[in-house]
């Protein structure tokens, strides 16, 4: 409990120190570069030690990654400087929405199947943005031991690929702590937050940048190839249910 309180105090201090520089920098440049520093330092305060393996993504990159924990946001945003595709439900919390907006978050309603074409078009337009864009095609967090089926819809944003665009699978590898940080099942978000921040030992995570995928195939094949590449990088093998979700 002492460590949890101490970290919360440090996070509050960090936010207070960066909020004004962030607002001023964004007002002048239109960019939220200070937000990346917040995510990176916040992750460090929480005990996360992130290591990128492979080249940094270029702005015209669509990152597809496995999703283990809410920590993934800090890890990818702080280490890779990415913006995110997020579920529309995030906008229901004013504070979370404000934080998400600072990293140029793109909101989609995954339940609105009739709007898929509009969502794909919105992702496609982001290839002209100054930040790489990260999406979690599982749609929710997993248990740290296996991947959920990848939803193929947003892969359509790279078919055909805009000029200069890349589709890069990224494996978020928490090593032996994957099941510890995983947020799944009946565990509430607050309970998981307290449990993770109360741990004394650091949590090491490798961000494995995998080979870009050729976007010439259809979206279902791309989803299957991305999930297989990430599973292989994480040593999970290829489970029987790797066929992409419809």
Image: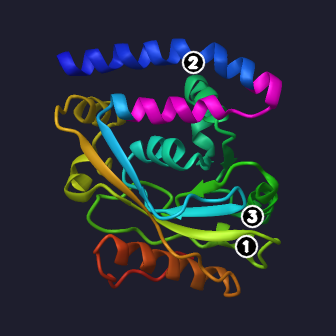
The spot of residue 150 in percent (x, y) is 50, 71
Q: Which residue is mark 1?
A: 158
Tell me if 196 is positioned left or right of 160 in this view: left
Residue 238 location in percent, x, y?
A: 34, 83
Vertically, is 203 above or below 148? above
Q: Nearer the viewer, residue 5 or 22?
A: 22
**Residue 243: percent from left, percent from top:** 46, 83
Q: Residue at x 36, y 33 (%)?
A: 44
Examine the image and state in which quarter residue 100 appears. Answer: top right
Nearest to the eye among marks 1 and 2: give it.
2
Quarter-of-image position of residue 222: bottom right
Which label's residue is closer to the chain start, 3 or 1? 3
Quarter holding residue 119: bottom right
Inter-mark Cα distance, 2 to 3: 34 Å
Residue at mark 3 to residue at mark 1: CA–CA distance: 9 Å
Residue identifier under label 2: 18
- Chain part drawn in magenta: 26-43
Q: Secondary structure at mark 3?
A: helix
- Say whether disc 1 or disc 2 marks the residue closer to the N-terminus: 2
Q: Residue at x 37, y 68 (%)?
A: 147
| In magenta segment, residue 79 | no
Q: Which of the image's four quarters has the C terminus?
A: bottom right
For the residues labelled 1 and 2, the Cα–Cα distance comes to 35 Å
Would you call the spot at circle 2 few (<14 residues within 10 Å), some (14-19), or many (20 or more)? Answer: some
Give the residue drawn at x 44%, y 45%. 75
Left or right: where 94 falls relative to 11? right
| Local crowd size for mark 1, using a 10 Å CA cut-off: few (<14), some (14–19), many (≥20) | many
Say which residue label 3 marks: 120
Name the dominant secondary structure of the magenta segment: helix
């Amino acid at each position: 409990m002492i460590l949890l309180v101490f970290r919360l105090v440090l996070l509050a201090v960090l936010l207070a120190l960066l909020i004004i520089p962030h607002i001023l920098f964004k007002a002048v440049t239109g960019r939220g570069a200070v937000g990346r520093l917040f995510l990176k330092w916040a992750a460090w305060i929480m005990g996360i030690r992130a290591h990128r393996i492979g080249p940094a993504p270029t702005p015209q990159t669509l990152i597809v990654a496995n999703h283990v924990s809410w920590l993934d946001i800090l890890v990818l945003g702080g280490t890779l400087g990415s913006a995110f595709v997020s579920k529309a439900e995030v906008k229901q919390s004013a504070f979370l929405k404000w934080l998400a907006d600072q990293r140029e978050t793109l909101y989609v309603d995954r339940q609105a199947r009739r709007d898929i074409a509009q969502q794909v078009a919105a992702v496609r337009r982001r290839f002209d943005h100054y930040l790489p864009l990260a999406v979690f095609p599982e749609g929710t967090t997993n248990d740290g031991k296996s991947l959920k089926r990848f939803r193929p819809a947003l892969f359509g944003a790279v078919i055909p690929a805009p000029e200069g665009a890349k589709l890069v699978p990224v494996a978020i590898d928490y090593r032996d702590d994957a099941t510890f940080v995983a947020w799944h099942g009946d565990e509430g978000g607050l309970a998981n937050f307290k449990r993770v921040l109360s741990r004394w030992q650091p949590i090491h995570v490798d961000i494995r940048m995998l080979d870009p995928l050729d976007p010439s195939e259809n979206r279902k094949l791309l989803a299957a190839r991305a999930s297989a590449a990430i599973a292989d990088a994480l040593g999970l093998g290829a489970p029987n249910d790797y066929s992409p979700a419809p």
